[in-house]
Amino acid sequence: MTSRTDRADRVARARSGRMRRFMAVPVLTAVVAAVVGAAPAVSAAPVMRPPVAAEPRPGLPPLDPAALQRAVSSAPDRTTAVLARVAGREGSWTGVSGVADTATGEPVPADGRFRLGSVTKTFIATVVLQLAAEHRLDLDRPVQGYLPGVLPDDYPPMSVRQLLDFTAGLPELTGDDLPMDPQGIVDHRFDDHSQAELVAMAVRHPRPFDRPGSAQVYGATGYYVAGMLVEKLTGHSYQRAITERILLPLGLKDTTAPETDTTIPGPHAHGYIAVPQPDGSHRLVDITEQNPGAGGMISTTADLDRFMTALFRGRLLPPEQLAALFAVPDVPYLGGGAEDPGKGRAYYGASLMRVALPGGVTVWGRTGSTFGYTSGMFTTRDLRRRLVYSFNPVTGGGNDLALVNRMVSAAFGA
């Protein structure tokens, strides 16, 4: 895995941490503001919350194309392109804003491809859960038993399940490990670091909490390890595992999991970053081509919608493993507060976040960022309404809360 996605989110969130095989720090709606803080110790084997099937089903407003178009067009000063798709029982809607290429003024293709960033985590989690269904791994067995020597010897046992739901307590890469400033991003966008390298750099830092399973905090290191686990058990790259186990069976012809290809095939909007100049101005640099990394999967809104639909309907996972995907640990969220989705408690299952919107609707999904690209996918648990979006920020990556808020509100009536 190379270090690209969490790196981009950290530019926007804390100006720290650059990697090629990174997976992006998630931010959804006005609800996410997770930062570091103390977490009380809770049982190392957390009690899981009730199955999501018991969620209430409040009504959704009718699709409002005008409101959706206003939402995707609401950030022309911070993005060069936006595209979104809403689908469900009432039909579908697609909309675009901005330009695909600032030099030519080419319009944004509604079927354009984009880099997924940390949305890739959901694909990796799905493969790990498939391996569990095949009895090739035990979710509650320490990962150290599968990957001896990857984590320091003085680390306590950390289960595979804890890697997937962000309760392992692994440290993260920081700005001291890899370049982070805009010019550094431009200069190093083709750098490549193996998953093992990234884990080795990350574990030099203090762990966020001592007891695995006692708290939840979002991070990328656990998914580097999960990717290594997939490769150990399958005998080939995690990208190949995703392709053979998910992309080909679902016919996701516009989705790819490149290992080294720096380009985006097919129609797409360009990604940019604003680089400060000595005179105080900014120069917009095209960074569309970059080392793909862990968040280097490429897809379209239609393909991601198909993936979400198949995943939630159980086409990719049997019931036990599908339940694990949505199992949110009943533990504190490290540094969480009233503003975040869990209001101080955990809100992630195995890569997916659960968010109760102000109108009473609960959505599940995932966000991701890499330099020049930010994406997200959200749906009600019963798939009656689904949102997939991508936009091209010029700030180096990360989620634009105001823009995401507007799109989510327009789609789900939040």
Image (cartoon, rainbow, N blue to C red):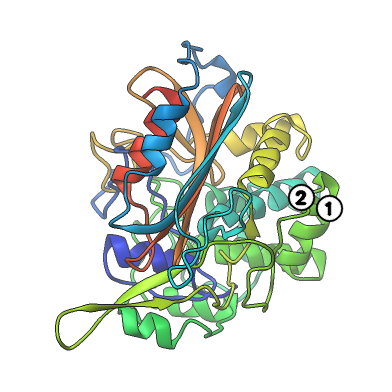
- Vertical placement of 119 versus 359: above or below? below
Q: Residue at x 64, y 19 (%)?
A: 89
Residue placed furthest toward the left: 279
Q: Which residue is labeled 2 in the image?
A: 252
Q: Quadrant of the N terminus?
A: bottom right
Q: Residue at x 55, y 23 (%)?
A: 52
- Vertical placement of 390 versus 380: above or below? below
Looking at the picture, how far across and down is residue 191, in whole percent? 52, 85
Q: Quadrant of the C terminus?
A: top left
Amino acid type, residue under disc 2 in the picture: Leu
Marks counted in the figure total 2
**Along the line of sight, which residue is nearer the eye, 146 or 105?**
105
Label 1: few (<14), some (14–19) or many (≥20) C-alpha neighbours in 10 Å:
few
What is the quadrant of residue 319 in the picture?
top right
Q: Which residue is labeled 1 in the image?
A: 248
* Residue 115 shows in the view: yes
**Along the line of sight, which residue is nearer the eye, 184 or 271?**
271
Looking at the picture, how far across and down is residue 398, in whole percent? 37, 59
